[in-house]
Image: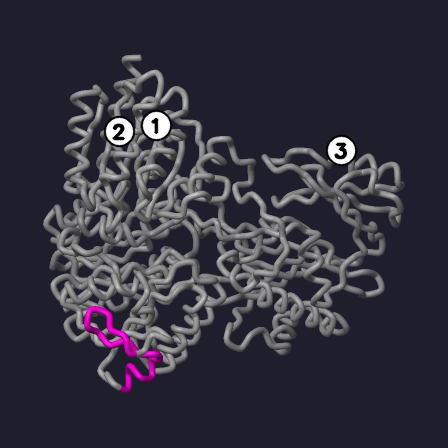
Amino acid sequence: MSILVDKNTKVLVQGATGKEGQRGITQMINYGTKVLAGVTPGKGGQKVEGIPVFDTVKEAVDKFPEINTSFICVPKMAAKDAILEAIYYDIPLINVLTEHLPISDAAYTVASAKEKNIRIVGPSSIGIISPGKAKLGSIGGSEPNFSFTIGDVGVISKSGGMASEISFILKKEGLGQSTAIGVGGDMIVGSTFADLLEIFEKDEETKAVVLFGEHGGTYEEEAAEFIKAKKFTKPVAAFISGLFAEMLPHGQSLGHAGAIIEAGKGHRDDKVRALESAGVAIAEIPDDLPKLIKKMVK
Amino acid sequence: MLKFSLMRLYEYEGLKLFRESQIQTLDTIVVSSADEIKDVELPAIVKAQVLSGGRGKKGLVKPCKDLEEVKKAAKEMLGKEVGGEQVEKVLIEPYLIDKNAEYYLGITYDTVNRSPVVLVSKKGGIEVEEIAKEKEAIKTLPINPIIGLQPWQARQILSQAGFSGIHFLSLTKILLGMWDVFTRYDARLVEINPLIETESEEFIAADAKIILDDEADFRHSNLEFPPRDVMGRKPTESELAAKEIDTNDHRGSAGSTYIELDGDIAVIAAGGGGSLVNMDALMALGGKPANYTEHSGNPPKEKLEKLSKIVLSKKGLSGVWFVGATANFTDIYETLAGFVQALRSIKPKPRYPIVIRRGGPRYEEAFKMLGEVKKKEGFDFHVFGPETPMTSTAKTMVDLANKFKGKR
């Protein structure tokens, strides 16, 4: 098994004819992912890598009712609209690559998805890969096999580049991945560490999970609470970035109201302390992750 | 990733937005020179317009009883440098003597509920960090962004915070006004601290703290706020020069993010998240970075050459670390060729260790070129490919730099 993405994943690409869309489609098809249709308003009737492009999501799902995943790579100005369109047509998994989405659009679309029990991963997500089965988005670039291999460690990363780098470090030490997910580093995201730990808990194939966190926000603390409450019972190792960024003058949190909400949370130290108290092994540098995982998984 | 997406507004700019949304403020005047001050309501308060908080403690808020004092205070504040920020404007407002109480109202985003949240406290007028210590004195209410703040919700949270009677209706109106500013301008934060209650039970916003979400700039092309420095200090010459590189050439990015630091290990990193992890690793191992910069999106050779020249121009370096994850589409040959070109132009010739870790398109070709340059020109290259985790090379860099310093 694996989570979110596998052989049964049937993909719609919103923003199919753009640079990111075309690149994503090529990479996904090369990896064996089933890409059924694309949408770009005004470009209906075109094809990308032989995949039909429609003007609307409605046309795409009418033609391919088996679509169960949307990969969204439209410019930030159009992203809210595209996500809402996918939500309206009940596509259960929406992976948003779009970066620099306004926070109000992120909050709005995440709330809309929640009402219909739809899962959003992203924005600013590099994608999702279940090695040997399928990949969504740009994760692993054109050579996913370089960084990823079949295995039993789940990877959840706020940074896209680090999702690959950490998987590569694990692979070098003989640890493959069940599923690796770029959740995006934005303040408001559709899926947090805790949201995904919940699914990894049920996945028999996953024996342990590695987290890549960053300073800011409270998602690492939320994960620590989740683990403490025994809702996730498998070994977890984490690397939390922020040592350098917090040294910078603008590396501080929002201050002001942020200080009230995030009192005692948000800094790298707060996150490390919370995770350690939940039994998570913290790596000083990412290279230590395989060692920590091996120690915990007997 | 480092986020540069926030735009803090000055108090006078924030107050203007409050007035548009029918939130009562004082009659203020804003001047950039003491000579502009002619007639003010006395007694008055002079407040320096800076983006950082805690103005009271820094002597940037001064009550004055006559015009002479006002002019003197303004003169003292204008041009003053506070934490790298220069005071360009001061705001003058009447000093409220009939103050009854000071409250706190705020709206921001909350990662726990992943939604906007309204905050209300009867303990206003003090530093937010102080308010934060008394959790029970603050009431918070998450707001469903699809529905927006409703009047009944505003009344509910105000009631929970201990307000009643006549307060209710005026404060509800203010919260709704703040919500209007928050949504209309795509704000990350809208805060009134203090909200002053006068003896005649009027409510006046005596400060405005507003942070806008720069990512939403495409919806606000008509906003007229002058650009401001996000660093909290003036950019250095190198930082300005680095920024120029991207301004004039939009192929890939190299230089937009460049921060000068006081260490001795120059860094040319690739990729947003990964570059920060490398900086963390370098610092965890005791290395002192001379700068932080990041390039991505396949910038051409010339841009890397320009950026490298700026990085390498720093005096007293004991090492250079060219580091990045395995690139998806950045041409490694081009970027490293640009770096080598810059190395050649540095006088005296760099003798310090140069650690390179890179992978991606044309990296093998690039490494062959580096080998030849090393042999012919004698640079101390230590080259690692994708088979070596990038953060492992942080240790190599720190060790080599220490050895170099020992010899010097």
Please provide the residue range marked out in magenta: A45-62
Quarter where residue B292 is shown: top left
Can residue B19 be spotted in the picture? yes
Q: Compare marks 3 and 2 and give the one earlier in the sequence.
A: 3
Residue at image position (88%, 50%) is B41
Residue carrying label 1: B265
Chain of the residue under the numbered disc 3 shown in the image: B
SS label for mark 3: helix
Residue at image position (24%, 30%) is B355
Residue type at mark 2? Met
Q: CA distance from mark 2 to mark 1?
A: 8 Å
Residue at image position (28%, 27%) is B398
Tell me if residue A237 is in the magenta stretch. Answer: no
Give residue B315's position: percent from left, percent from top. 41, 21
Can residue B113 be spotted in the picture? no
Q: Compare marks 2 and 1 and give the one earlier in the sequence.
A: 1
User: Is disc 2 in contact with disc 1, using a CB cutoff of under 8 Å?
Assistant: yes
Residue type at mark 3? Glu
Give residue B219's position: percent from left, percent from top. 54, 64
Q: CA distance from mark 3 to mark 1?
A: 40 Å
Quarter where residue A210 is shown: bottom left
Residue type at mark 1? Ile
Residue carrying label 3: B76
- Residue B397's mark? 2
